[in-house]
Image (cartoon, helix red, strand yellow):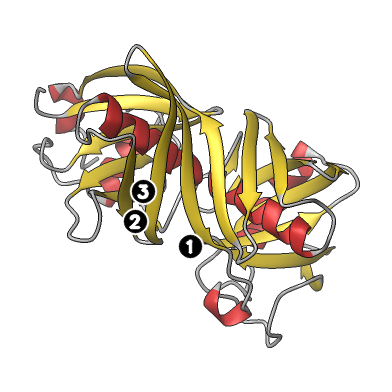
Amino acid sequence: MESNFFVKTHGLGNEYVVLNEDNITFELTEKAIKRICNVNFGIGSDGILLKVSSGKADVGLRIYNPDGSEAEKSGNGLRIFCKYIFDYGFVKNRKFTVETKGGIVKADIVETKNNRATLITVDMGKAIFKSSLIPTSFPTEEVSDEIINVEGKEYKVNCVSMGNPHCVVIKDNLDIDEIKKYGTYIEHYKMFPNRINVQFAKVLNRSEAQVLIWERGAGFTLASGTSSCAVACVLHKKGLVDSDVTIKCIGGDLKIHIGDDWEVRMTGKIRQSCEGVLNEDLLEDLDK
């Protein structure tokens, strides 16, 4: 594998560039992250996944948003990363563990084609509803239908952590223009000290829900694994859906299973777009 080798893969249209810490010749600074993720001056991506060493799991993962900030966890990012380390031989077994800033994740390669992973289940950990642990600054023990006002518009918000913070707004109708306009204001709302991921969710029936997603540090996105888990957990806690629910993102569907102890597992497809080597011209421009 050449130096600065990369893979670009998407999970339901949520795309990441994957790099190996031991294989790159440059420092992955905030400027470098922004440059690589830029669709005009770099490769173009919703973020970067960096393989790192781990003393607690089979492999370690760092997740970076396109604005250069670091994320604790990403469901689509995790499945993309699991495909990468399985396809390129960093692990030999179909079941393995990944260490993230949001905790240790168990992964299972469910289906393969030509020895390459196509369908992956990841253990997303436990949904946490305690306000201070998400974290939020609301004085209530949990954030359920709390009213916030952003730019003159009122929303009832429900918050949960999936290793990263989420704010779910349950709606009768979904409007892409609305979440694109107000998502950033909710993300940066004063009661969310670490900012927050935002989901507008519509219940379709006991086993399906539709979602629009504004991702912290990335903006409007076609799909998100942790967002899908967050929506499923909030809706299940409110008694609106069952413990097995399909979350329908714009980019495609994710199947979520919620255990009795709020342990969550997610299953979804992954597709690799390309592989290659970062060009010297791009490497020269990474600090711009």
Instruction: Indicate left or right for 183 with 192 as reference.
Output: right
Residues at marks 2 and 1 touching, judged by CB atoms closer than 8 Å = yes
User: Mark 3 and mark 2: span between their CA atoms?
Assistant: 12 Å
Q: Nearer the viewer, mark 3 or mark 1?
A: 1
- Left or right relative to 29: residue 49: right
Q: Amino acid at mark 2?
A: Thr
- Looking at the image, the residue that sits furthest to the top is 114
Q: Position of residue 179 (x, y in %)?
A: 73, 46
Q: Quadrant of the N terminus?
A: top left
Looking at the image, which residue is at 36% across and 48% down? Answer: 64
Residue 266: image x %, image y %? 55, 43
Closer-to-camera residue (209/37):
209
Packing grade of label 3 (10 A; few <14, some 14-19, many >=20) is: many
Instruction: Tell me, for residue 44, which label it has, or none.
Output: none
Disc with the residue nearer the chain's start (3 vs 2): 3
In what element is the residue under mark 1? loop
Foreground residue among 217 and 104 = 104
Q: Circle 2: is it few (<14), some (14-19), or many (20+) Cα within 10 Å?
A: many
Question: Residue 145's x, y, as percent?
Answer: 81, 70
Amino acid beneath label 1? Gly
Q: Secondary structure at mark 2?
A: strand
Q: Residue 130: which quarter of the image? A: bottom right
Residue at image x 49%, y 53%? 124
- Residue carrying label 3: 64
Callout 3 secondary element = strand
- Is 265 positioned to the left or the right of 6 in the image? right
Q: Which residue is mark 1?
A: 163
Relative height, residue 68 to residue 114 (above, below): below
Considering every residue shown, the one lying at the far bottom of the view is 139
How far apart in space, not on screen, are marks 2 and 1 (Cα)?
9 Å
Q: Mark 2 highlights which residue?
A: 100
Q: Amino acid at mark 3?
A: Tyr
